[in-house]
Amino acid sequence: MNFLSDNAYGVLPEILSALTAAAEGTAASYGSDDLSHRLEARLTAVFETPVAAFAVISGTAANALALATLCPPHGAIFCHVEAHIAVDECAAPEFFTHGAKLVGIEGTDGKITPEGLIRALSHFLKGFVHHPQPAVLSLSQPTECGTLYKPEEIAALSAIARAHGMKVHMDGARFGNALVSLGSSAADVSWRAGVDVLSFGATKNGAMGAEAVVFFAPADASDFAYRRKKAGHLVSKMRFVSAQLVAYLADDLWLRAAQTANGLAAKLAGGFSKIAGVKVVHTVDANEVFLRLPTALAQRLRDEGAQFYDWGPPEDGLTVIRLVTSFATPPQDVERFLALARGE
Amino acid sequence: MNFLSDNAYGVLPEILSALTAAAEGTAASYGSDDLSHRLEARLTAVFETPVAAFAVISGTAANALALATLCPPHGAIFCHVEAHIAVDECAAPEFFTHGAKLVGIEGTDGKITPEGLIRALSHFLKGFVHHPQPAVLSLSQPTECGTLYKPEEIAALSAIARAHGMKVHMDGARFGNALVSLGSSAADVSWRAGVDVLSFGATKNGAMGAEAVVFFAPADASDFAYRRKKAGHLVSKMRFVSAQLVAYLADDLWLRAAQTANGLAAKLAGGFSKIAGVKVVHTVDANEVFLRLPTALAQRLRDEGAQFYDWGPPEDGLTVIRLVTSFATPPQDVERFLALARGE
Amino acid sequence: MNFLSDNAYGVLPEILSALTAAAEGTAASYGSDDLSHRLEARLTAVFETPVAAFAVISGTAANALALATLCPPHGAIFCHVEAHIAVDECAAPEFFTHGAKLVGIEGTDGKITPEGLIRALSHFLKGFVHHPQPAVLSLSQPTECGTLYKPEEIAALSAIARAHGMKVHMDGARFGNALVSLGSSAADVSWRAGVDVLSFGATKNGAMGAEAVVFFAPADASDFAYRRKKAGHLVSKMRFVSAQLVAYLADDLWLRAAQTANGLAAKLAGGFSKIAGVKVVHTVDANEVFLRLPTALAQRLRDEGAQFYDWGPPEDGLTVIRLVTSFATPPQDVERFLALARGE
Amino acid sequence: MNFLSDNAYGVLPEILSALTAAAEGTAASYGSDDLSHRLEARLTAVFETPVAAFAVISGTAANALALATLCPPHGAIFCHVEAHIAVDECAAPEFFTHGAKLVGIEGTDGKITPEGLIRALSHFLKGFVHHPQPAVLSLSQPTECGTLYKPEEIAALSAIARAHGMKVHMDGARFGNALVSLGSSAADVSWRAGVDVLSFGATKNGAMGAEAVVFFAPADASDFAYRRKKAGHLVSKMRFVSAQLVAYLADDLWLRAAQTANGLAAKLAGGFSKIAGVKVVHTVDANEVFLRLPTALAQRLRDEGAQFYDWGPPEDGLTVIRLVTSFATPPQDVERFLALARGE
């Protein structure tokens, strides 16, 4: 019963097969191979617009390289105060951008509101050299709370960003999970809603280690290839990263995998909502479930072999925990976990 | 007939199997898994001394992170003028170190001599704030010319470095190829000869994408883990990188693969040394062969389907080319290439 | 009637004379001159402990260089959410540290409380590579609100910092103003209360352009000289910076200048506290006065020729303004400003 | 008899007066004052074209900020192998640019030749991500050897740079000395010859601490103001830096000062050229004289109280020394030095 993270699980069989196939023969190195070329075409199809896409091997690399490409050293990046880029990447964006400022914005359920963004922007005077200059708005989709921005919410925030001369980045480490939940097209959730660059995650949803940075205005990406190389993120046998992504995108594999994960999360949420004394903290929009439950219950579940993270210290006998489901979480683990929680 | 690079070839079957095995079940993420722990133990055994070892996914990452760990922003890194870190990493070391100076030292066959090192050091006054301060000597083993430093040569250079308060880094992107050629132990070529940190490459010799940074004085590595994370090089499913390295080190797989590659290079060198008008430019110590041959011959070989890089522009009807063999280069390709060169 | 900033005023006559005197003859460059040596001795006397001191020409340089010396790239710097280093230096600390994280702590009157610091620290797990590691606590003395930390308050915060393995930095851009107000010794407000490094400002209090970075444990400063040079802050004719600081410290000139400025601020505060409809927002501990007053009154004062900054946008017909007095603010300007405010 | 450096001397009286005058009353801070505005106008007049000009307080700051403005992190900066930016600034350009590569080009008398530049460029393939991309050519005028580029030589090098998509920077730490020697207009030596940005030095030629970065295409300077602030080089009382530069440019003060310095250097060169056993090493184009003379003679001159730097270690009983004259070097020191050398 591992609900620690979706990245605790392995690799989709289709992706393993793709890697095995890619290991045959020889190929051009450093991303000049056929699979890497095919990846860009595939993403162009998925997003219904010509994109410039670059494979990397970690979400932190995807985010930090994307942000550094759009934000000068004297720029400011606005994000939710609990965004992954703000709290869980050891300040990678500050390093890659050469010292840009991350500005955390409060907001319930992990979401930034237009009012919150406007208020935050009011502290940064345009052209005033003492202030970092607003450069990028970064949205997490899903958020750190497992909630989602609707396309029109993204559009509203993007419009504000654009009015302030900013670009919009989306951290889509679990983009597939967001998409199947919203029932929108990939385009609607990204560039049609004003997103300029997307960190398109695959690792958490069944790849071995593969993410893509997708620029919807290819001109924005003019120096990305150099940044990727200079940061040590251009791997020599790039075909093995691209192969994962190409297989991931084929035959809706990614959407099916995300559907599986989301379905299990919904089952968890549904089950727990009926258990007295347990509260589902945030709407379960994707594959993460946050519960406030008696600390004793959390302990009992752990004693029974379940793994999950506490989300903050216990308070008044209650603890908030996070459960993450994945493409490969055994459905019976979900059943058993619920049964244990019900005291069965 | 692909002699472009060893990284044009795929993956050793044992490594593919290891990846498939690692994809089962769940595992702790970000390097807290069993395979990652085993890797350090395995390298400790290989090097006969307790090491601190960190897996990364590219040679540039290994080099730049290792150098940044040992060299402060105001430091200078001394290396051969043609070293990979100096010319082929888009100045990654300068980025990771926050602006350290790379000092290129001339030397025949890609090798630094004690005299060359001492001369270079004479331009950097200790304690003089206008000069970057000597911090690291970086040696490539094998060199960019496919030649090798003998353990006693490394020791002599290390002694000079140490006398100047410097640490010693070894870029071992093809460390296995060096080792089997020298017939020395891994320890003799590294820490016993004064090396403090080694970029231990596996990708070129049959891994999918895996290198290890090996510190022989674990205290030197105190902040490496943070640097790796901050640079986006701590992948979530680290077990798949570690799995490659563990398999690579098992049952001398890496040494056998390197032996294969070196043997093919020796065959090429031996064959070409008997062809009139062709000159083997550098001693063939590992798996790279540099030839000066008539430009027309090079063209003819290409026309027949052979792939290789020119190493500089043609001059007086002659061109220098580089041939690299690998663990998976078909022996018949070597035979056919030689036959074509002989005009058969 | 210029209350915009103390740096709107010129230079103390004693400092001008010192510059003129220093212009005679020749001197060693880059800080090897007699005046620069004397500066360190003078600061050692002022602080009653051997210090390592370095002259620079701006407060931002002093802060950013001091912080970068104590904080690694993967470190976190804790400061008040409105600290100058956090909001008014265009993210210079992030640049100089190579990407460290600034963590803003809320607190009334510009001051950090022990509770606030402890709460902020709770989000940064020691040894957890995803989190920047707590490295430096930075206190502004006086704060951005013109208030002061008492020595025992500094000591309490320093103790927490030390218990978490952090160093303590003090931004003393107006350190003289703080000192004369507290009536403490320079030592009591700094190292005896746990401060490791002080940005000792002189420019705002009558120098032309001179600040000193003062390390109370000289070993901490081991690479400062290189950082200063590498950042372009080692000026060739350093004697002219040192001359300012030496003159500033001679015969209590700095304390007298600060006394003047503080006295005028007290007069403003006293005067305004008696005017109906005007509220003194923060305790006036040094030379800054924050008033909440009718927007119409602020406008009228400006129409009469007074200069000062709004501190935030008007709200409900009221505006917060900041008044800064200096060593050279004409007393009659204070009188006249008060008279105008009283409607006389 | 101080010939160590022109920065060993003090300040031109006109500049001291200007500082005293600027100390009166109040002024806007951070460069919004009248003198700072006047500076840009004055430089526009001197260069006969609208410029964007920024005052800073050190030559290293001027160079590193100018270079970082024109060179991306993945760029390469080409300069003479002995250029100040390459050897005497503790790798400041690498720090400010976030890791750009400095490429040293050999060349006699401190000068780069078109052939040398073209050869160096041949190692950097355009669009090849492994290579830093050629971004800036930096020329020192005068060179580190005290020699000069003629306008047509600058134009020839600039044309090559431009053909490779590069910008041209000129390190004019002693630009005045160059100008009076060439007898050209400031425009002819700079933008008309293809220079995009000039580090316009004043400190060595009689200012207290003031340099200007002059962009001839103001659009190039779009983010300079932020870079200056972020690096701590925007001083609060900027009027005192601008005042120096405005006075320096008034009434040809700078040209007269440079004329004085150059005249004394010419006198030294002329005198030494007649002394047997002493060789003037480089053409004396400005205010630096390099002599190869018997080590014993150098020692004797020092014993008599003369100060100067050795330029390399003694060889075969001979030593190369550097003599620098300044706007304030006493003519009698030159006479006496020559007399001593002649054994009088």
Image (tube, coloured by chain):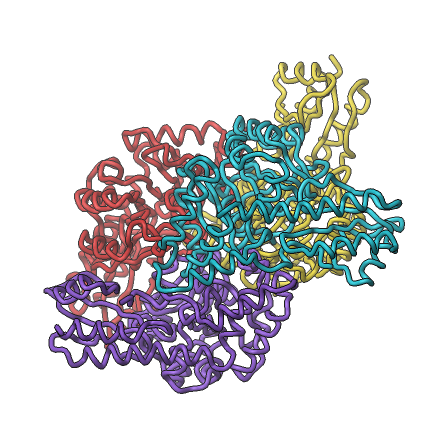
Chain colours: A cyan, B purple, C yellow, D red
Task: Provide residue D245's location: percent of width, then percent of height.
Answer: 39, 37
Quarter where residue D150 is shown: top left
Nearest the camera: D241 or A295?
A295
Image vertical order of residue B34 relative to residue A38, above or below: below
Q: Nearer the viewer, residue C249 or C131?
A: C131
Asked which quadrant contains residue B146, the reply is bottom left
- Relative image position of residue D210 (x, y in whole percent): 42, 42
How many numbered circles are shown?
0
The residue located at (77%, 56%) in the rendering is C160
Rendered position, C163 above or below C89: below
**Image quarter of the C terminus of chain A:** bottom right
Give percent across and percent down for residue D16.
Answer: 44, 39
Q: Position of residue A309 (x, y in %)?
A: 74, 55
Q: Nearer the viewer, residue C282 or B285?
A: B285
Residue C343 appears left or right of A9: right
Q: Quadrant of residue D297?
A: bottom left
Asked whether residue C152 appears in the rendered view, the answer is yes
Residue sitting at x 77%, y 23%? C272
Q: Assign the N terminus of chain A to one quadrant of the image.
A: bottom right
Q: Relative to C183, is A17 above or below?
A: below
Work out whether D138 lies above or below B333.
Answer: above
Q: Is residue D246 left or right of residue A210?
A: left
- From the viewer's side, name the closer residue of C195 and D65: D65
Q: Is residue C206 visible to us here?
A: no
Q: Residue at x 35, y 54 (%)?
A: A32
- A282 vs D59, left or right, is right
